[in-house]
Image (cartoon, rainbow, N blue to C red):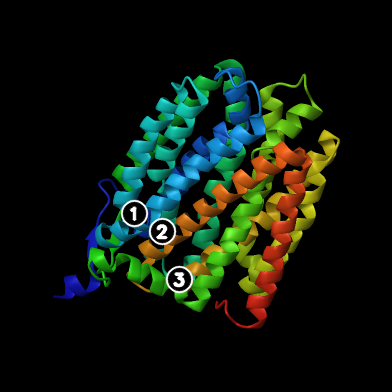
Amino acid sequence: MGDEAEGRVLAPRLRWGRLEPWRQNLYVLWFGSLVVSLSFSLVMPFLPLYLVEDLGLKADPSLWSGIVLAGAFLGTALMSPIWGALADRFGQRSMLLRSGFSLAFIYVAMGLSTTPLQLALWRVLFGAMSGFIPAATALVASNTPAASLGIALGSLSTGTAAGGVLGPLFGGAMAQWLGYRGAFYAAGVGLLVGAILAFLLVGERVPPYRGGSWRQLFPELLVLVRRPSLRESYILIFCQQTALMMAAPVLPLIIAGLAPTASSLLVGVIYALAGVAQVLGGPVTARVAGWRGYRPLLTATFLGAALLMIPQAASSLPLLGSARFIFGFPLIWGTVALTYLVTRAAPEGQRGQVFGLVNSTNSLASMTGSLLGGILGHLLGWNAAIYGSAAVFLVGGLLSWRFTRTNLLHE
């Protein structure tokens, strides 16, 4: 009876010294999040170039880049609530393994694509099977003592950020030395390694599921969305991710345009500078938030990101690179603040559904941002997408300020 009330404990197959279980999970999932983020960001800087140089696209690279990027986010948005509900029933660890092993195969398939349409379809399936990082976040949030939660979430975010740094660097180097297709294959191998480590070393305390039947899934999701603190957090997550992804279809093209003779490695280096700042800023997020709290920090990060996005439409690489680096600090602080606020507002036993909705929101926003950025870049020029991104960050800052003043965001 006691076991049923407390849920199930799934011990890891291997123990790492005398580490506490939550610390072992944190270290392994930090590495797993790094690998998954690295694999994702590895292809981002050269995806528009891959379409042109390997898949034979002759026109509209920014528009097709937006379509291909959006395909993955469409698949994620459709499937994330289902994966979240499954996680609440069977545990987050099962979602880690499902995502890691399936994505390893899909990356190889993307490297075998021969047309832009094939790549776009594989990206939809990629999005539908994704979810490693949200599952890792939910697992850490559910299995970490409350006193260490802020530090653990901040530390975990550095794994994702470090992948964002290393991915463009590795991707640029591999695209130069192995070709674009070789970079996809390398990403698949990395994902396979991360999934195997999670299979061997991650354990989990699965709380008893307190939801209803599958027919009640969507009513349950509506109840969660209507909770004020969660609803406002989802709105801000949508604003942040939309703004971030509006620049994604055009930024590699802007960099390549400023240095037409530069190697793909240089494009990757400049693209990764924001990730360097995220790695540096992630571990101190809890300390920064300790001055005023996570809610005021969130408002400041939105406004700072809006200001720092504008110089990324620069006419020189040094100015663009400097702005890109500093931009990473408000980005990581805002991400951790939102994750913390969502975790605190999530009902016990439904964190899988809550983080599934986070993943769906991120994906819908990424799809919206990618399409908007591609369309703006196609119709009004590449810099228009950058200015549009700054405007959405500004809207997010104003909304965050309003939600904080009306106490809709709770710490």
Residue 196 image position (x, y, % from top left)? 33, 38
Residue 121 image position (x, y, % from top left)? 43, 33
Give left or right: position of 149 versus 326. Answer: left
Q: State the residue in front, 285 or 386.
A: 386
Question: Considering the numbered disc 1 on the image, is that residue within a helix, a strand or a loop?
Answer: helix
Mark 1 Cα shell of 10 Å, populated few (<14), some (14-19), many (≥20):
many
53 to 132, vertically: above or below: above
Quadrant of the image for the C terminus? Answer: bottom right
Q: Residue at x 31, y 57 (%)?
A: 87
Q: Are marks 1 and 3 in contact (CB under 8 Å)?
A: no
Q: Are marks 2 and 1 in contact (CB under 8 Å)?
A: yes
Picture mark count: 3
Q: How far apart are marks 3 and 2 (CA)?
A: 12 Å
Q: Which residue is drawn at 24% across and 61% down?
A: 9
Tell me, for residue 83, which label it has, or none. 1
Q: State the residue in front, 221 or 156.
A: 221
Give left or right: position of 86 versus 369. Answer: left
Which residue is labeled 3 in the image? 225
Residue 13 image position (x, y, % from top left)? 25, 46
Q: Residue at x 51, y 53 (%)?
A: 364
Furthest toward the front, the residue is 379
Give left or right: position of 310 versus 166. Answer: right
